[in-house]
Amino acid sequence: MDGDRELKHQTTTLTAARVSRLCGGFLFLSLAENVYLWRLKLKIMAKNDITSEFLKDCMAAAVMKLLEQWPLDKIQVKQICDASGYHRASWFRAFQSKSEAVTYHMVRLWQLYCERHGLEGYNDWVIDNAEAWFQYNYEIRDTLRLLQRRGLMKELADSFTATLHDHHIDDPVRAYHTAMFAFSLYGILREWIIRDFDQPPTEMARLVRETTALMI
């Protein structure tokens, strides 16, 4: 039993150290993203377990940090593994590509933001969430600028479809409805990024409400 407890302690310590490494010298680009990592740290230390979700979170975080220095196609799997503390086999179990890791990261950030702020329907478009959605994107604007600079807007668009558009919806009306809003929101955000966030979140929310009313 003492041996089992020691092994469990070593595993927990290793996990906490890995997250502390990410939270310390491996900071994200915004307050929202830093909160994300600390939530992960508390979650893992409480569960005393390395989950597949946590593995993906750490590796996706590593990719995002490395993007600050290199284009995505220049980032090597070894760099990702060294930065996250996981082995190559873990990377290939978690993701099929670096592009997928970027998309996963963006989806997870929005999920956490909704949890933190008590927003319902994170995977559905709710007009009442418009201002919160723009505020969220404004908080991670440095990350969004990074994606634009690295030519990764497709990965951002994929995060919208992964979050909002379920290709397996049986109801055609709902399927087309979610597709329309997923791509519309991406287009609006893309324009906001290109304009370097020239309008505040409150004004962007007002513009979307007016545009939505015209569409209906």
Image: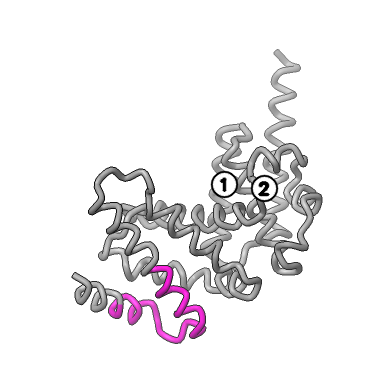
Magenta region includes residue 190: yes
> In x, y percent, where is residue 115?
40, 51
- Position of residue 40 relative to residue 32, above or below, is above
> In x, y percent, where is residue 26?
70, 59
| Amino acid type shown at disc 1 | Leu
Q: For mark 2, what is the residue?
A: 19
In the picture, the quarter occupied by the N terminus is top right
Q: How is the image coloured?
A: one colour
- Position of residue 152 relative to residue 12, above or below, is below
Q: Residue at x 57, y 47 (%)?
A: 40
Q: Secondary structure at mark 2?
A: helix
Q: Residue at x 36, y 69 (%)?
A: 184
What numbered label is drawn on residue 12? none
Main SS class of the magenta portion in the image: helix
Q: Which residues are magenta?
A: 185-207
Q: For mark 1, what is the residue?
A: 40
> In x, y percent, where is residue 36?
54, 54
Quarter location, residue 93: top right
Judge by depth and name the residue closer to the eye, 179 or 207: 179
Q: Secondary structure at mark 1?
A: helix
Direction top: furthest residue: 1
First along the sequence among labels 2 and 1: 2
Asked if the residue at tag 1 contacts the one at tag 2, i.e. Cβ–Cβ closer than 8 Å, the answer is: yes
| Amino acid type shown at disc 2 | Val
> In x, y percent, where is residue 126?
28, 60
